[in-house]
Image (spheres, rainbow, N blue to C red):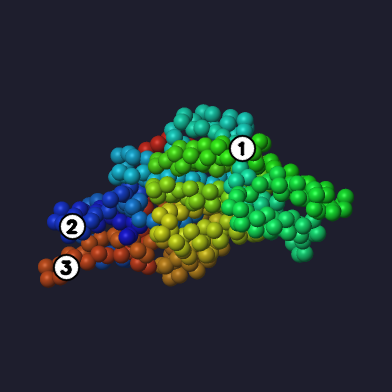
Amino acid sequence: ATPVFTQAVLEYGTNLKANGKEESIAQYGLLAGILESSNALKNPSETHEKDIRLFFNTTAPSSVFICGSQGSGKSHSLSCLLENFLTQSKANVLPRPLTGIVFHYDPFGGSPCEAAYLSSAKDISAIYSHLPQVVVEELRINQSDLDTRKMMELMAVSSVQGSIPLYLHVVQRILKDLRIEEQLNGTTFNYREFKSRLTIDAALAPGQLGPLQQRLDNLESFMVREQPSHTHTLDQYNRLTRYILQPGQLTIVDLSCPCVTEETACSLFNICLDLFLQHRADAGLVIALDEAHKYMTDTVESAVLTAKLFENIRVQRHLGIRVIISTQEPTISPKLLDLCSTTIVHRFTSPDWMQALKKHLAGASILTTELFTKIVALRRGEALLFCPSAIIDVRRSVTKHPQLVKLSHGHLKIRVRERVTRDGGRSVVA
């Protein structure tokens, strides 16, 4: 199914459904208005010329990459897409809302994630306190949610350069032994048992105990202070599936804190993503990365998160997920850019960014100078949309059956619609 289509295509699909020939697109939302088409359309239909509305298909799994300079409108585009997926409004047709999760990280921690305005720890609570219908809770991980891989990530074992110290070899051995026992006994990870074996089994020198304790302290800072009983674990699982993963619910994992490094943020995002995928309900799941350039850098942890997203985009049709990545820099992950079905490019002025797009977008490898001139001249809220599988018109003739016209290697200049919920991304000027 096409991720993007025009009013002419919507009318064609509706007529087919009325005649009992095919199912029309069940869920969709208004994304933008078309300001200008590339040379993909030589003889546009009458409907295409009169109605400039461009819709996003929320029925089928898809992936969207949004990039552009600060203040160009990329967070606004992300929020409009989330509205189409989560909130029933006059801008969409959404009989079955999806469930959303947004990952947000800002090392300065001064402003809330803009996606929180869809609702129209004390510092974070204060930041979000002026937003209605937003519930703020600490991010705490239960020991039952941990396994060997997650433990290694939270203890930052993979980020060690060169040969790892002796105490980490001991940690790996104990985790391996515990994993074997868990599989034999059908139990989950027990953090107390792990610490007990570290104390009893590991004959570590005093100089090694200090660095080990630092890693354990970092790990424990993100765990619940009192590990729950089995009954409490079931209660929390039911809460996750019945409340957080409900259709129309948006969960924002906001790790904006000067004490949280981008490496730790990526590790925690990866764990949260695993938990959401494990416990996802029947409703489709939207995964959004807000301001991804702030944490998807050249670190090992970022590479792990990128690989996880890469894997999920590959099998998104089987999992029923949609992925949206919003970033200033299109250079963060060329592999992700290759896999995304739709790319929305807002204004930027960097020639290096243009070179990155040129290598990975259909239609960007030719007429590079002309495209770059268009991108630099874009106004706030305007963008160029690249989507080879987008269906932008229906070509009719007397002698032949109607033909669907794809965007292919062309592009569309669009203006993203206004939000139906509160806009939280306005620039602050003097």
Q: Residues within 10 Å of mark 2 (few under 14, many from 20)?
A: some
Which residue type carries mark 1? Pro
Q: Position of residue 157 (x, y in %)?
A: 71, 56
Q: Which residue is at 43% across, 56% downward?
A: 319
Label for residue 16?
2
Mark 2, secondary structure of its residue: helix
Looking at the rendered structure, the number of numbered marks drawn on it comes to 3
Residue 307: x %, y % from top left:
56, 61
Q: Residue furthest left?
A: 398
Task: Give the labeled residue for mark 1.
Answer: 228
Tell me how far mark 2 sits from mark 1, CA to CA: 55 Å
**Label 3: which residue?**
401
What distance separates the C-alpha of mark 1 from that of mark 3?
64 Å
Q: Earlier in the sequence, mark 2 or mark 3?
A: 2
Q: Quadrant of the C terminus?
A: top right
Residue 82 x %, y % = 42, 45
Residue 355 seen in render:
yes
Compare marks 2 and 1 and give the one earlier in the sequence.
Answer: 2
Residue type at mark 3: give it: His
